[in-house]
Image (cartoon, helix red, strand yellow):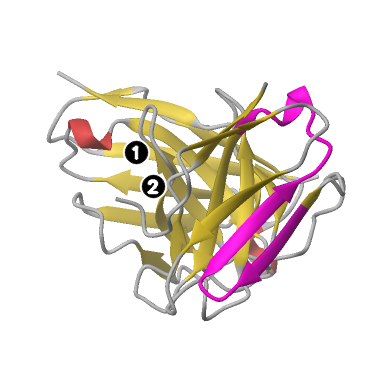
Amino acid sequence: QSALTQPASVSESPGQSITISCTGTSSDVGAYNFVSWYQQHPGKAPKLMVYDVTNRPSGVSNRFSGSKSGNTASLTISGLQAEDEADYYCSSYTSSSNLVVFGGGTKLTVL
Amino acid sequence: QVQLQESGPGLVKPSQTLSLTCTVSGGSISNGDYYWSWIRQPPGKGLEWIGYIYYSGSTYYNPSLKSPVTISVDTSKNQFSLKVSSVTAADTAVYFCARVGDSRPGYYIDYWGQGTLVTVSS
């Protein structure tokens, strides 16, 4: 069982928006603004999409945005495109000895 | 542009030691600006953090791992390595080496290697 809870799957039509949630605790997501999101296509390495809750690395589309409220972080993808179909993982710094925790991943299907 | 490349055997027998090396190019491990990490992903499953290392040799390991783990660094070769001892089938996974985008462990990963599949089987 993963430390951060994500929905196993979500789906939406092209052009629409979708939000993926990532729920942790007051020891990780709720305590620190160090949540990151990764996109992983089949057989590929993960790619950083959002870091420090809201920041986008250079080269990542502004269709991807992050936010946080309490113990839950969210990744919103607007104007869905076929290429966005992938697995998405959240991660957070944690005060426990683990240092970092991952979510179980969410499979996004663009219908 | 930083690039990371994993290398090592793709098949390891149960109870033996899994050994992988990550070669970093496009940046120096010893400039001290970043931590370096190993992360693994069992087939069809999610990501699991294994550990971090700094150029000085300072390390952090995931206490939840069942198999003993050692991460080391060789700054002269711009490489860092992973050893997992007494492996079982549960250690079968794609292993990624990666760079932490900060000089503190536990933060986001900004560069990943392509990953290498290691299968534990007799």
Magenta-drawn segment: A65-86
Residue B76, by quadrant, is bottom right
Residue B107 vs residue B14, the one in the foreground: B107
* Crowding at mark 2 (Cα within 10 Å: few <14, some 14-19, many 20+): many
Residue B46, by quadrant, is top left
Q: Given the image, on which type of amino acid does mark 1 rest?
A: Ser
Q: Please tell me whether residue A92 is drawn above or below residue A44 in the rendered image.
A: below
Which chain does the residue under circle 1 lie in?
Answer: B
Determine contact: label 2, label 1, CB under 8 Å: yes
Q: Given the image, on which type of amino acid does mark 2 rest?
A: Leu
Q: Mark 2 points at which residue?
A: B82
Q: Name the residue under label 1.
A: B19
Residue A96 vs residue B73, the one in the foreground: A96
Which residue sits at x=64%, y=40%? A39
Give how far across and how far down residue B37 sits, in percent. 50, 55
The answer for how far apart the CA atoms under marks 2 and 1 are is 6 Å
Are labels 2 and 1 assigned to the same chain? yes
Which residue sits at x=43%, y=58%? A4
Residue B30 vs residue B106, the one in the foreground: B106
